[in-house]
């Protein structure tokens, strides 16, 4: 699970970890990977432009946001267009591995889409008890393949059979268990924090960091996950200093990723991350007392905005 309040970066951290880096790692090590990305909020074109923006920055150091790439204000130069053309073969392979789906929004439809892929690329064995047949086990044709299913985000699921949103989110979580336990899929559920998580009372009590108690619309999903990470931005709350970092200077370029919970421990651990939302980049921050490294971060940020004091 990835969770944060609205507009903090829960989709971006999901894309960075479970799409861009997962694909990069598997591609470099010859590991087959298939990612089903159920984008309930953004269309495929938007997701692909975001991927272009990320790749241009990683491969060529070119910082162009998705808005810049759409040429809404300034036309792209021929140099940039040539760079994009160079990535044609890369993105042909990327689109074979990553499938963005925008028209399947109900829990069973998501489950069926991923299950159908698994059954088409493996064998499902059943056991018979009396006249009934029950799932026994599944064997993939290529047991090295990673299959990842991402649902972004849970509060936008379409309820089924007259149920409400809370039931739909609970159903999605249960279907994810079946995909994980029966077919070896790695499901990722993006779930928003409730707006009350950023209330004045929570601010006064220093409880702004994402938590299970702060999950929006359905808290039952926490029971089914193996690992939950949350994302927090102090700049949003006009906090001047946080965990030793100068938020007045870093502003929106820092996020704090926390372990909300997991079956193997780690609860409460926090990783400070440099964040550039324009190109979807996350990178671990140096320690706050390592002034030489911190100055390098400031110098990098000053290339595209005024640091100030």
Image: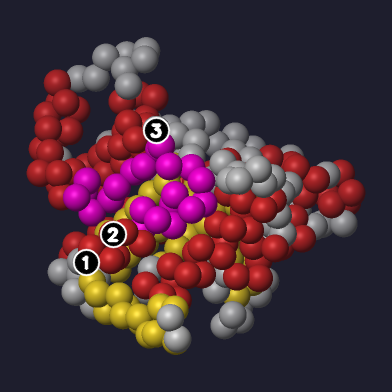
Identify the image quadrant of residue 66. top left
Say if mark 2 contacts mark 3, CB within 8 Å.
no
Q: Which residue is mark 2?
A: 117
Say if mark 1 contacts mark 2, CB within 8 Å.
yes
Across and down, in percent, residue 113 comes to 36, 53
Looking at the image, is 271 positioned above or below residue 124? Answer: above
Q: Which residue is mark 1?
A: 121
Question: Is residue 110 shown left or right of residue 154?
Answer: left
Distance of label 2 from label 3 (alpha carbons): 22 Å
Determine if residue 299 is in view: no
Question: Is residue 168 shown left or right of residue 86?
Answer: right
Across and down, in percent, residue 223 comes to 66, 70
Considering only order in the chain, which callout, 1 or 3, is on the residue closer to the N terminus?
3
At 75% from the left and 55% from the top, the residue drawn is 214
Nearer the viewer's eye, disc 3 or disc 1? 1
Nearer the viewer's eye, disc 2 or disc 3? 2
Question: Crowding near pointer 1: few (<14 within 10 Å), some, many (20+)?
Answer: few
At 62% from the left and 51% from the top, the residue drawn is 168
Q: Quarter holding the N terminus?
A: bottom right
Across and down, in percent, residue 209 comes to 71, 57
Question: Crowding near pointer 3: few (<14 within 10 Å), some, many (20+)?
Answer: some
Question: Is residue 139 shown left or right of residue 229?
Answer: left
Within the magenta stretch, is there residue 111?
yes
Viewer-side residue, 75 vs 61:
75
Q: Which residue is mark 3?
A: 43
Question: Crowding near pointer 2: few (<14 within 10 Å), some, many (20+)?
Answer: few
Magenta segment: 94-114
Mark 1 residue element: loop
């Amino acid at each position: 699970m990835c969770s944060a309040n609205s507009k903090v970066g829960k989709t971006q951290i999901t894309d960075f970890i479970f799409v861009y880096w997962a694909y990069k790692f598997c591609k470099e090590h010859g590991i087959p990977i298939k990612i089903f990305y159920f984008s309930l909020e953004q269309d495929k074109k938007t997701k692909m432009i975001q991927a272009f923006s990320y790749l241009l920055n990683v491969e060529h150091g070119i910082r162009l946001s998705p808005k810049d790439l759409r040429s809404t204000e300034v036309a792209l130069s021929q140099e940039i267009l040539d760079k994009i053309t160079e990535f044609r073969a890369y993105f042909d392979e990327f689109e074979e591995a990553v499938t963005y789906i925008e028209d399947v929004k109900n829990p069973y439809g998501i489950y069926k889409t991923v299950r159908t892929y698994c059954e088409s690329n493996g064998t499902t064995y059943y056991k018979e008890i009396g006249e009934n047949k029950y799932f026994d086990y599944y064997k993939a044709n290529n047991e090295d393949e990673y299959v990842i299913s991402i649902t972004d985000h849970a509060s936008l699921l379409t309820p089924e059979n007259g149920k409400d949103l809370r039931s739909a989110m609970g159903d999605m979580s249960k279907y994810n268990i079946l995909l994980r336990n029966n077919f070896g899929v790695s499901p990722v559920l993006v779930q928003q924090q409730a707006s009350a998580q950023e209330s004045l009372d929570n601010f006064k009590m220093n409880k702004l960091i994402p938590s299970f108690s702060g999950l929006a619309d359905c808290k039952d999903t926490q029971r089914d996950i193996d690992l939950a990470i949350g994302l927090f931005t102090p700049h949003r709350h006009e906090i001047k200093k946080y965990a030793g970092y100068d938020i007045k200077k870093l502003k929106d370029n820092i996020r704090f990723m926390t372990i909300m919970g997991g079956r193997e421990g780690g609860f409460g651990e926090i990783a400070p991350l440099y964040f550039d939302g324009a190109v979807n980049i996350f990178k671990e921050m140096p320690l706050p007392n390592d002034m030489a490294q911190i100055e390098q971060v400031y110098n990098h940020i000053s290339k595209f905005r005024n640091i100030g004091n």
